[in-house]
Image (spheres, helix red, strand yellow):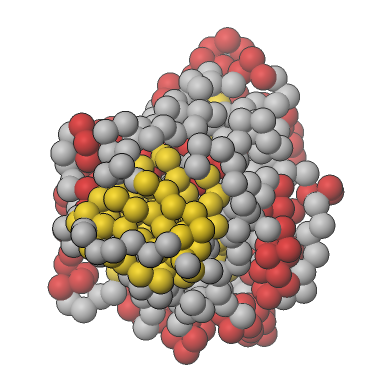
Amino acid sequence: MTDLLVANARVVDGTGASAFHGSVAVDGDRISRVLGAGEPEPPARLRVDAHGHVLAPGFVDIHEHSDLSPLVEPGMDSMLRQGVTSVVVGNCGASAYPAEGAPEVAALVGADAAELDLRWDDFAGYLDQIDAARPGLNVAALVGHGALRLSVLGAEQRRPPSAAEMHEMRRLLASALDEGAVGLSTGLIYAPGLHASTSEIVELAGALADRGGVYASHVRGEGAQVFDAVAECMQIGRRAGVPSHVSHLKVEGTAMWGRAERLLALIDAERSTGGDVTVDQYPYTAWETELASALPPWVTPEELPAVLAEPRERERLRVSMTEGEPGWETLGSSVGWDRVVLGSFTPEPSLTGRSVDVVARDRGVEPFEAVAQLLLADRYAGIVGHGMHEDDVRAILAREDVFVASDGVATSPDGPLGTFDVHPRSYGTFVRVLGRYVREERLLTLEAAVRKMTSLPADRFGLAGRGRIVEGAGADLVLFDPDTVADRSTFEAPHAFAEGIELVVVNGRVAWDGAPGEHAGRALRRGER
């Protein structure tokens, strides 16, 4: 007798092959049989009739910031209820390992680091703590370059590492890779990553060459600098001899609209000469990040009070944030302060959802002054930038080789992180693709879209046995109604769960069937089935 049988389904197996009518049997945490139409069903302890709806591999989200969600909100509901069964955390250079990065990551997602047990001496200890938390989803992790820098260089972030410091950074990374990390990430618009040279990252990424793993980057610019920034990411992969991955590909700012095809051509050109590069994207025209990214590289939020107190430095900041600097583009000129809105602003909740431009006008100050005031009130204030054009989003999404990834945080409306995220991608990324772009707009076939969400990202990030419906694979499954699946989360009301997801199975256990089920997720180590 098999443990679980999902019968009478339209099976989309994650490989891109045509859907077929059949059933899938599960024993333990593995898919034991894949049955075609008409094959006799084995007896099962639990039989679910799919009524002809789509059964796919659980979605694999390889760009998340849910590093601490398993410890804070182990149900990880916003992701689970849109069909995600495995996530990759540690992105954009920020990771909970080494432990020096954990308080920073906690603050960024609105967790109270003082109330969490953030103690691990090694990467294996971090994964062990995830296992002990019994999360709703599987969790794999990158190591953040920024976290490595914080651990080794401490407060001295504007200088390059010494030879000894680089050796220590490589040692920490190599140790994590040996213990199951899936690669290295950078966030080159954020401190401390923005202070790193290309050569520094190449040298560090070289540790991947011997042990495997991918180099994933939030590149150095996504507006006017995006072509150079993407080229740098690919150059790092070439020079280090490792696979490279561009996170959340986009062209940002009105001056860049219409150039998505040119950016894709740049990536194709790299591949045509043997370059090993992949990309991901979320299907929205707005991004979310921290307000501190609006500051030029020479000032941090901690240094801001002293800068504002000195007249010459204050004027330097005003000019920089108004006109930009060589190699650095201000949000005001690239996106426009009228398109940059505040996220959940705890010190003054009435400002949530208001643009920097409106806040500045209401206070009778320039935008740079408004940004400074807001950062003085909340160093970790978040913003949403409505900086992309739908035509560019569609051009990138239409590519069958571009992964779908959320750049979100696993949360829930009433959970401890429920006040943090104001971007609908945490609740709706995957179902938005299925509902809007597959069913309504027919931009992609269902089979191609599922492949972008499952086998392609799982293979790239070394998640062995995930992303396919095949005998012997991990039993991560999602059953959904293709006629009703849809996102309901909006920028105005982001904390709204997806619709049309009928069943989610994680490691062979029912995690969602219209009601919460078992927490059956675990830490995933690179290459481990």
Q: Position of residue 12 (x, y in %)?
A: 26, 56
**Based on the displayed image, in which of its 4 quarters is residue 131 positioned?**
bottom right
| Res 529 visible | yes
**Residue at 20% across, 71% down:** 271
Q: Is residue 518 left or right of residue 337?
A: right
Q: Is residue 396 left or right of residue 83?
A: left
What is the count of numbered marks?
0
**Based on the displayed image, in which of its 4 quarters is residue 93 positioned?**
bottom right
Q: Nearer the viewer, residue 212 or 342?
A: 212
Q: Residue furthest bottom?
A: 210
Q: Nearer the viewer, residue 333 or 325?
A: 333
In this view, 25 is above or below 492: below
Q: Nearer the viewer, residue 391 or 379?
A: 391
Q: Position of residue 170 (x, y in %)?
A: 59, 81
**Residue at 34% across, 53% down:** 7
**Based on the displayed image, in which of its 4 quarters is residue 251 positioned?**
top left
Q: Is residue 14 left or right of residue 413?
A: left
Q: Position of residue 150 (x, y in %)?
A: 69, 64
**Residue at 21% across, 58% down:** 37
In this view, 297 is above or below 474: above
**Residue at 46% across, 60% down:** 44
Q: Position of residue 452 (x, y in %)?
A: 29, 56
In this view, 390 is above or below 282: above
| Res 283 visible | no
